Image (tube, rainbow, N blue to C red):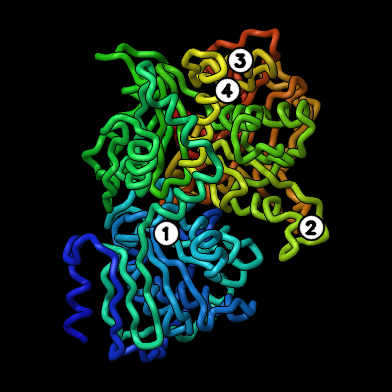
Amino acid sequence: VWAQVACLSQPLGDMGGSASSLATTDVDTTPHVVKTSPIPGQKPGTSGLRKKTKEFMRYPYLHNYVQSVFNTLKDLNVPVEGGTLVVSGDGRYWNDKAIQIIIKMAFANGVGRVWCGTDGLLSTPATSAVIRCREAGFQPFGGFICSASHNPGGPDDDFGIKYNCENGGPAPEKMTDLMVAWTAKIEEFKICSGLPDVGLNVPVTYKLGGKTVEVFDAVEDHLALLKKCFDFQQIQKMVSRSDFSIVYDSMCGVQGPYAKRIIEQELGAAPGSATNADPKEDFGGKDSPWHGHADPNLTYAVELVKTMGLDKGGNKIATEKPPPSFGAAADGDADRNMILSSQFFVSPSDSLAMIVANSHLIPQFKDGLKGCARSMPTSGAVDLVAKKRRIDCFETPTGWKFFGNLMDSGNPKYFPDTQTYTPFICGEESFGTGADHVREKDGMWAVLAWLQILAAKTEATGKLVTVEDVAKEHWAEYGRNYYARYDYEGVDKAKAEEMMKKMSDMSIGGTTVQGMKVKCNDVFEYKDPVDGSVSKNQGIRIIFEDGSRIIFRLSGTGVAGATIRLYLEKYESASGDLLKHQFEVVKPLAAIALEISKLQEFTGRDAPTVIT
């Protein structure tokens, strides 16, 4: 038996391609208790715990955090004992080792069954779909996702881990606070140290004494759920048109297998439409055009942006051949998306508003949309749609977990006495869009939502309708929220915090700066309309008399130093000039923001790292 299990742990391909089941009853699954001590700084940000890979690799960093999660779950009476746990990730460097450690710790803590995607891969939205929909649905008590999202992967880059609950969504703040408390007092962890590693390269079920590891096709559950949301046949008709072409760039992240299966096989796009579709542990590495930074924006998705006939500033450039009619990109863990058409980029804020405005064309919302939401820094474009359509609209802090309660509103299990806001669509300016089919932002869902809208409009008009066509039609009805985000990455954290503190203490309402009158300024605070919880210090807002906004935030998703995010928004009514370049329109706001914040003095930066 020992030799047999060792065989199963060999690299990809050793087991062939067929699913099987193997009972291995003599494997040592004895839990061992190992003494440890707290490791400072194990506090999750907006999307889990992220650190440099080498820090995670330093024993027992991962062990301490995982045990702290299990301790928290047991304190909260989560049914860990004999339960099912999902464990997978985005394929970045050290994912394979981390998954094996978590499996051994899960069994030592009483878990009865572990589910893993093939090769240890599951996109973040697919993990949520597995938790909610696999088998009879809601079988696991939760899941670990090994990912640092859009951050680079590799031995000298970033690693991350986060826990998702039984509803498929990220652990709420009240739970992560308890996890952090455990990291500060932990004295021991449990692990089945005698258990060999298990192979994850093909679908197979391992029966290890009284424990089970089930490996399944990473794409199947997410695909099955998406087929319930969209009319694949209608999209196929548009994809088959001679004047339609598509490129979906996965940037060597986990979306590759999903893109090949859904875009090329299910929808019938030409072979090669899914580009950079082989997941790599370094997301292509330093030698790739995006330097291993699988982040779908104009700065990093340079290969796609060039193919679509644009430069990183969103300006049109000449191309060797006509650009495809539709383009999209995904990040490392496939929860983010970028949408383009030929020589045209639609901002994530506008994308959210346009999907909400056209939601009646998506089968998922055939009975109507009840609610929508955006993160506070996201432009107010969706608010205008919601107001006209009489849909409840919410402004939340940044972080997908804040949408979770709204999606579970009215659910008898969680919030039986609250108003129901689902069906529901939500999004963030940081290229995240999704709906209540899962409890994570979903890059593939956003791409299919756009394809569905274009397919429906193309069928109705008899001619190919593009993203640019939809955008111009939208602006003509609602006006345009010109918008840009400046990222200052890797700045000195202490200086960044000092700058934010000084702005928090300012009171500049009623003053005029460079000719623009300030209406008010504040530090954003959010009271959850579903559970009543309050989240403070969620960003600095400066709002002008004409409705323009300047927002400052310190990002919670970075690893090295601090990232200052500056958001700029200026509204132009439907009767105004709607076709100017968005980055040019907001430049005067950027000058005001730099004057008020003294950012250059605090950081020494003369220009942002990224503009998008």
Q: Seen in the image, is 186 located left or right of residue 396?
A: left
Percent x, y of residue 75: 62, 80
Identify the mark at residue 532; answer none if there is no mark.
2
Percent x, y of residue 394: 73, 41
Closer mark to the observer between disc 3 and disc 4: 3
Q: Circle 3: is it few (<14), some (14-19), or many (20+) Cα within 10 Å?
A: few
Q: Are marks 2 and 4 in contact (CB under 8 Å)?
A: no
Q: Are marks 1 and 2 in contact (CB under 8 Å)?
A: no
Q: Are marks 3 and 4 in contact (CB under 8 Å)?
A: no
Closer mark to the observer between disc 3 and disc 2: 3
Give SS at disc 4.
helix
Q: Seen in the image, is 187 located left or right of residue 407?
A: left
Identify the mark at residue 160; answer none if there is no mark.
1
If the image is split into quadrants, where does the N terminus sit? bottom left
Mark-to-mark CA distance, 3 and 1: 41 Å
Q: Circle 4: is it few (<14), some (14-19), or many (20+) Cα within 10 Å?
A: few
Mark-to-mark CA distance, 1 and 4: 35 Å
